[in-house]
Amino acid sequence: MNALAATSRNFRHAARLLGLDSKVEKSLLIPFREIKVECTIPKDDGTLVSYVGFRVQHDNARGPMKGGIRYHPEVDPDEVNALAQLMTWKSAVADIPYGGAKGGIGCNPGDLSKSELERLTRVFTQKIHDLIGVHTDVPAPDMGTNAQTMAWILDEYSKFHGHSPAVVTGKPIDLGGSLGREAATGRGVVFATEALLAEHGKSIKDLTFAIQGFGNVGSWAAKLIYERGGKVIAVSDITGAVKNPNGIDIPELLRHKETTGSLKDFQGAESMDANELLIHKCDVLIPCALGGVLNRENAADVKAKFIIEAANHPTDPEADEILAKKGVVVLPDIYANSGGVTVSYFEWVQNIQGFMWDEQQVNKTLQNYMTRAFHNIKSMCQTHDCNLRMGAFTLGVSRVARATLLRGWEA
């Protein structure tokens, strides 16, 4: 099941539990605006090349729309629609005053030089500058984009609208980026894990962890779990997978990956089949990579008692049902990986105030938000007698529906 079908299914289930009026349900599903633009740039050799850029703005009932911009060759409109919608519910679950958006350009960033990427980003910004804005739609980095991309968007946007640091988040620190933003998603995953485990009378230091994906989110989550005394016994990424039943020395593994660019040949652990990681014996499994990795083929073999969804949509609905029957507790992506958008919100707030926070304040406030959101989800689970995924969806959808009705959009 693709991301859009799964997200829409979860939304409809939540709408039924909440008893939403069908007109409201329909209006919440339809995106506010979809933008598609042509971006033609000269390549370094002088030839012209055209790309298609787009932005789906899903909902703005609770505030400006918010979501990433990705540069990827297969930018699928359905997936972007799903991710924009997911951002609406995710912002509402985290209780930050945003709606959802998502966008990008259908290109392969690896095939473009830095100056070509800059030209492409500036042309894209010229085409959409009057449709984004500090109080309208605030982009952020995603697959294939980074802080430098945001710096170019900020610069190009500011030519039209004056200096506007709050128009994008995930910026370089020197241009108004927030301290703690780089680690935010991984740190949020760990705060979410702590909140869930506390509910079950457990703590990180007593448990074993397997982590799929060792990019930004996976490596930060692993590092912070290691610092809290948790035992990370298996790690994988696209370069390979390693395991050590006594726990992997994460700072050493990070150094090894930094030096060699790969997990292979790491002395402190033995290599394993990357496909085995998801069904490796451990207490807590944290998928931090691609969507759809837990499906009906492998869900029955999962040995973890807890799954923390750090990736977007890692668990298919069919796998969800199998895992529920086994009594595995799944902490849903819509909550578990919301640390990134929460600290993006802190960055936006700091830019609007023109007053920057120290890193300790960022991390402490993030912990407060993640812990509070978990307790709000739990109370929805009790009200509607449902699992954590539906608890999160009903929480998010009910907040957006309330805002929509209060603003008088149901007429």
Image (cartoon, rainbow, N blue to C red):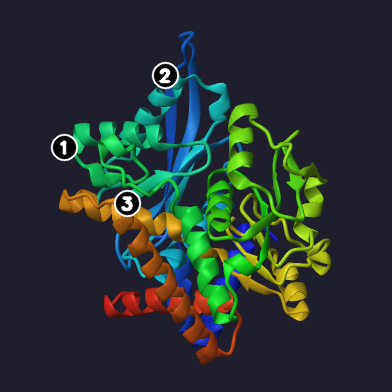
Picture quadrant of residue 209 = bottom right
User: Could you tell me the amino acid type at mark 3?
Assistant: Glu
Closest to the observer, 313 or 251: 251
Q: Which residue is mark 1?
A: 162
Question: Which residue is located at x 38 percent, y 32 percent?
Answer: 148
User: Could you tell me the amino acid type at mark 1?
Assistant: Gly
Distance, label 3 to label 1, CA atoms, is: 28 Å
Side of 48 where 401 appears, left or right:
left
Quadrant in which the N terminus is drawn: bottom right
Q: Are marks 2 and 1 in contact (CB under 8 Å)?
A: no
Q: Are marks 3 and 2 in contact (CB under 8 Å)?
A: no
Closest to the observer, 322 or 136: 322
Q: Which residue is mark 2?
A: 115
Residue 125 in the image, given as x and y percentages of width and height: 34, 35
Q: Which residue is mark 3?
A: 359
Picture quadrant of residue 175 = top left
Front: mark 3 or 1: 3
User: Which disc is residue 107 wearing?
Assistant: none
Distance, label 3 to label 2, CA atoms, is: 33 Å
Q: Count the numbered circles shown.
A: 3
Picture quadrant of residue 281 = bottom right
Earlier in the chain: of badge 3 and badge 2, it is: 2
- In the image, residue 216 above or below residue 196: above
Question: Which residue is located at x 55 percent, y 84 percent?
Answer: 16
Within 10 Å of the Cα at label 3, are there few (<14), some (14-19), or many (20+) other Cα atoms? few
Helix, strand or loop at label 2? It is helix
User: Could you tell me the amino acid type at mark 2?
Assistant: Ser
Residue 195 in the image, given as x and y percentages of width and height: 50, 73
